[in-house]
Image (cartoon, coloured by chain):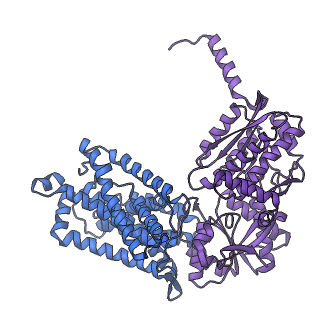
């Protein structure tokens, strides 16, 4: 075995330390500030990740055209995690070593990225999965990860608003949910409303799903359990294809449950395309500002369509908002881009007027979208639209 | 109980058809085609795509099954025969068929997009009641088709000269070839029947699962587990494994908890491999020995694949 000179080892260690960046780095170099993006831009969730990146890029271009942030241009570097936690964590480490000041994402690997943010003490924001347990890993009553800030859809908020609707309109609610943080987050949100009202769910069942293709076994056996529980409403907190499949099974059987969904149900056309007429009456919640777009949101959608030739989605809008929130945080910190300063300034973002509403972070609140910003909607198969539920 | 049985048999019929597709290919060629699940997906995506552009549903169904059958044959010529000609005793087909599976799913995702698409509801919107249980005509059709496939294949295998030559090839390909059997033709036929069975399973399950380019993984794994439970030695045994797996999965979901079907089939496979390593319904298994009906059969071997 060859001996390696001690000097060479020291030199290598120095070089590695220089490359590793981390919390000690300045976070920007020369005239640019690097922001990273991690999202699945291919595969089953590819459209969501691409929308997030498009929204970020649009905001970066606008900000740079207007002079940048504290005299520096923003540079966005987005990478595809292929919906893989391993890839996402590798990309996260790589972005830190490249002196990025913050990471946006991941819409599909949010729990991994948020946990890494906490571990590395490095700010993560924007489309961090669907908020909820990704940001508050110990539940809605606990503290959030200190360095994870989500402007994304929020399972707690969607669960709470749908739970609240069920309390007012159902004699009993059954919840079918997937066992991941997404499904558990939705259940936690529903439980916020039910615990506050001092009521209990009629049934709660965990269903394993393949996130690309849906449930791994038929859902018919669940119908009998729901009937036996006495519930007249079912929140099917599953993938849109399983929601459509379950509605089909239940309606073919002649069951007359009222069906509720989750934040994915009405975020795109997957559910409505699959369920068709059988989806009539399905309940969901939309961001209120999305339903009644003001002039700024309308312009954003036009610009987005012109630039990317696809319609903007909520993930594009909330990612766009996140870039402007980061800009505000850096400027409020006097142009400093170290992780500690950015985190502290993000905690002070108050009532930022974003495309997705009035957005606030505090030390305890690290998700911007709350139940107050949502409207319960119902699918009208005749018009193919989601209309406000009565 | 009746509901569990009905739902389980409907689910198991699909698993059984996929397991039979695996088994038919293995029976003749001693190759496991790991792209079998993707052949199911090909038929689903084809029917979905053609129906969406306005083709009559029956024509889309025929096209879907024909395409999955044709791709089954192409897999033999493109991914199996070349590697076996290079080394008849190698396991390179394992990698090449897995590669085909990935390629087929990727191509489908590129053509149709990665998310689920609609599928004609066929008979799935009409339900029928038996006692206190209910099923749809689509599920009933799946059970009937599985039964027909089972009987037809066994009759074909045991009552026709063609089938008997196939049995000879599966037992001893060298000897069968020496007496004039065209082993290549039988291999092509086996891959075609495999594609036909998987494609048919796709049409039967499409109204329930909708169309998704990644469905092949789910049903490929389930079909393979069914194959291990029933027995790899005979296609009919594989169908038995599928039906048993379906009933056990639904029963586990109903009587244990709604996630039990994730681990229960694997537990069953372990138990089966311990008590009957060749499968529950294979000849020479523990049960047939108990009943004194053991016949001398050679254990299945993965070597000597038919090129």
Residue B236 vs residue B15: left or right?
Answer: left
Give chain B's shade: blue
In the image: residue A375, left or right of residue B57: right
Q: Outermost residue toward the bottom?
A: B131
Q: In the rendered image, which quarter is residue A381 located in? A: bottom right
Residue at the spot x=58%, y=62% of the render?
A209
How far across and how far down the image is residue A251, in percent?
59, 81
What residue is rendered at 47% in x and 68% in y?
B48
Q: Is residue B93 visible?
A: yes
Residue B49 image point, x, y percent = 47, 66
Q: Is residue B170 above or below residue A346?
A: below
**Which chain, by letter, is purple?**
A
- Number of disc labels: 0
What percent of the width, then of the height, locates residue B6? Answer: 47, 79
Of residue A61 and residue A327, the one placed in the foreground of this image is A61
Q: Position of residue B18 (x, y in %)?
A: 39, 64
Q: Is residue A131 above or below residue A26?
A: below
Q: Quadrant of the C terminus of chain A?
A: bottom right
Which of A278/B144 is in front? A278
Side (left or right) of A70 relative to A249: right
Residue located farthest toward the left when viewing the structure as drawn: B179
Residue B224 at least partly seen: no
- Determine the residue positioned at 31% across, 68% down: B236
- Locate residue B61: give its quadrant: bottom left
């Amino acid at each position: 075995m060859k001996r390696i000179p001690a000097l060479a080892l020291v030199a290598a260690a120095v070089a590695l330390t220089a490359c590793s960046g981390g919390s000690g780095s300045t976070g920007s170099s020369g005239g640019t500030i690097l922001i990273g993006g991690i999202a699945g831009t291919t595969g089953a969730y590819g459209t969501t990740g691409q929308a997030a990146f498009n929204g970020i890029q649009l905001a970066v271009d606008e900000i740079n055209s207007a002079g940048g942030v504290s005299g520096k241009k923003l540079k966005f570097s987005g990478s595809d995690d292929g919906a893989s936690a391993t890839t996402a964590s590798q990309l996260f480490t790589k972005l830190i070593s490249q002196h990025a000041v913050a990471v946006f994402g991941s819409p599909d690997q949010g729990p991994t990225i948020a946990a890494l943010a906490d571990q590395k003490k490095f700010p993560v924001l924007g489309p961090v999965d669907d908020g909820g347990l990704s940001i508050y890993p110990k539940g809605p009553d606990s503290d959030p990860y200190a360095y994870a800030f989500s402007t994304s859809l929020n399972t707690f908020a969607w669960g709470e608003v749908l739970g609240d609707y069920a309390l007012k309109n159902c004699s009993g609610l059954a919840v079918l949910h997937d066992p991941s943080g997404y499904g558990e987050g939705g259940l936690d949100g529903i439980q916020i409303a039910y615990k506050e009202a001092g009521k209990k769910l009629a049934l709660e069942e965990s269903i394993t799903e393949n996130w690309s293709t849906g449930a791994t076994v038929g859902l018919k056996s669940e119908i009998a359990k729901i009937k036996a529980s006495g519930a007249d409403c079912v929140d099917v907190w599953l993938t849109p294809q399983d929601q459509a499949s379950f509605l089909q099974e239940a309606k073919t059987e002649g069951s007359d449950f009222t069906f509720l969904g989750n934040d994915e149900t009405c975020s795109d056309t997957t559910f409505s395309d699959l369920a068709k007429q059988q989806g009539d009456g399905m309940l969901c919640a939309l961001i209120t500002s999305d339903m009644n777009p003001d002039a700024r949101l309308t312009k954003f959608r036009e610009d987005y369509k012109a630039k990317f030739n696809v319609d903007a989605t909520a993930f594009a809008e909330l990612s766009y908002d996140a870039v402007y929130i980061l800009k505000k945080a850096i400027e409020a910190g006097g142009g400093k881009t170290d992780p500690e300063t950015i985190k502290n300034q993000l905690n002070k973002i108050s009532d930022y007027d974003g495309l997705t509403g009035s957005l606030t972070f505090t030390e305890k609140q690290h998700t911007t979208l709350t139940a107050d910003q949502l409207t319960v909607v119902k699918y009208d198969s005749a018009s193919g639209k989601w209309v406000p539920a009565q | 109980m009746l509901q569990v049985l009905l739902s389980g048999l409907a689910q198991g019929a699909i698993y059984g058809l996929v397991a039979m597709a695996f088994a038919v290919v293995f029976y003749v060629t001693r190759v496991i085609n790991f792209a079998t699940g993707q052949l199911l997906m090909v038929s689903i995506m084809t029917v979905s795509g053609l129906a969406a552009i306005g083709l009559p549903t029956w024509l889309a169904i025929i096209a879907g099954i024909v395409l999955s059958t044709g791709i089954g044959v192409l897999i033999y010529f493109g991914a199996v025969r070349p590697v076996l000609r290079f080394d008849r005793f190698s396991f390179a087909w394992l990698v090449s068929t897995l590669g085909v599976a990935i390629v087929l799913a990727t191509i489908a995702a590129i053509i149709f997009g990665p998310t689920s698409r609609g599928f004609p509801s066929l008979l799935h919107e009409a339900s029928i009641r038996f006692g206190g249980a209910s099923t749809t005509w689509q599920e009933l059709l799946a059970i009937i088709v599985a039964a027909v496939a089972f009987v037809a294949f066994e009759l074909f295998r045991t009552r026709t000269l063609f089938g008997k030559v196939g049995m000879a090839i599966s037992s001893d390909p060298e000897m069968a070839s020496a007496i004039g059997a065209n082993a290549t033709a039988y291999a092509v036929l086996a891959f075609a029947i495999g594609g036909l069975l998987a494609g048919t399973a796709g049409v039967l399950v499409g109204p329930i699962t909708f169309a998704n380019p990644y469905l092949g993984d789910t049903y490929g794994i389930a079909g393979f587990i069914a194959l291990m439970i029933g027995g790899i030695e005979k296609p009919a045994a594989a169908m038995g494994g599928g039906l048993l797996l379906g009933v056990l999965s639904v029963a586990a979901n109903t009587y244990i908890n709604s996630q039990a079907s994730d681990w229960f089939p694997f537990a069953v496979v372990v138990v089966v491999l311990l008590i009957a390593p060749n499968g529950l319904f294979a000849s020479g298994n523990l049960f047939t020995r108990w009943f004194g009906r053991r016949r001398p059969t050679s254990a299945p071997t993965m070597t000597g694949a038919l090129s």
